[in-house]
Image (spheres, helix red, strand yellow):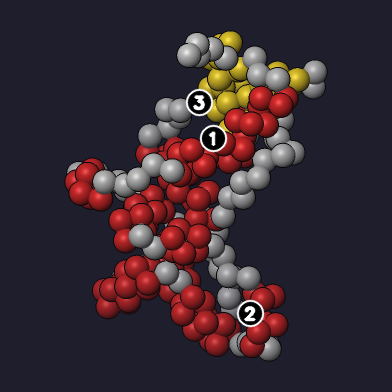
Amino acid sequence: MEIRDRIKELRKVKASELLPNPKNWRKHPDAQANALRGTLSEIGYADALIAYETPNGLMLIDGHLRAETTPEMEVPVLVTDLTEDEADTLLATLDPLSAMARTDEDALLELVSSLNIQNDAVNLMLEAVLEGETQALKDVGATPDLDELSAEYGELDPEMLWAEIKMRVPPEVKDKFDQWLLTGTGETEVERLADLLGSNERILLT
């Protein structure tokens, strides 16, 4: 079997100049965005985005969230000579192929245990992977939908709303938050919970 090399070049491109692919089927929850920001903060760029050339410019195949996260930065892009149909095939298969890999839990535990990561969002992501808590991966760092809470519970005063928010955070975050309540100083409860969730935003309560 002859395998072709479809990569034309590695090019540095300002992220905001890359065209988002309208056929991109991946959605990026807050947890993933927070973990990506944390990884970029810890390491920087060590992987390339993938794109193909169109009359309007470089169209992304892989790396949409990275481009959105660092729009003003020149990022590494693997420029391919793929046709639109071939790019669509790669777009549809790239992530599912990775997801088919099985996990060696002992090797993963040994690897993660050897790391010294300072970012809370990255640590929470790795903890969730180790514990197999896929729902936590979706929820970590997500800002509660206040309209949804109001529709479900009616008008909530701040104390009731704060209690509901604390009930909805992932278990590992709640444990860390409860530990902080015993010893923590210098931050409000809202600020500390937002930090544990890995969010740079603050939940606004009065």
- In the displayed structure, 77 sits above or below 140; it is above
**Disc 2 element:** helix
Q: Circle 1 sits in a helix, a strand or a loop, which is it?
A: helix
| Residue 186 picture quarter | bottom left
- Number of residues whose C-alpha sits closer than 10 Å to that of mark 1, classed few (under 14), some (14–19) or many (20 or more): few
Query: In the drawing, does residue 100 fall left or right of residue 113?
Result: right
Q: Are marks 3 and 2 in contact (CB under 8 Å)?
A: no
Mark 2, other Cα within 10 Å: few <14 / some 14–19 / many ≥20: some
Pair 1/2: label in front: 1
Q: Which residue is mark 1?
A: 94
Q: Position of residue 158 (x, y in %)?
A: 58, 84
The numbered dot on residue 149 is 2
Viewer-proximal residue among 158 and 48: 48
Badge 3 local density, few (<14 within 10 Å), some, or many (20+)? some
* Mark 3 / mark 1, whichever is N-terminal: 3
Q: Earlier in the sequence, mark 1 or mark 2?
A: 1
- Mark 3: amino acid: Ala
Mark 3 or 1: in front is: 1
First reached walking from the N terminus: tag 3 or tag 2: 3
User: For mark 3, what is the residue?
Assistant: 48
Q: Depth-wise, is mark 3 or mark 2 nearer the camera? A: 3
> Residue 27, percent across and down?
62, 50
Callout 1 amino acid = Leu
Q: Where residue 19 sits: x, y (%)?
A: 71, 30
The quarter of the displayed image where residue 137 is located? bottom left
Tell me the element at label 3: loop
Residue at the spot 46% in from the left edge and 64% down from the top edge = 135
Looking at the picture, which amino acid does disc 2 mark? Leu
The answer to whether residue 72 is seen in the rendering is: no
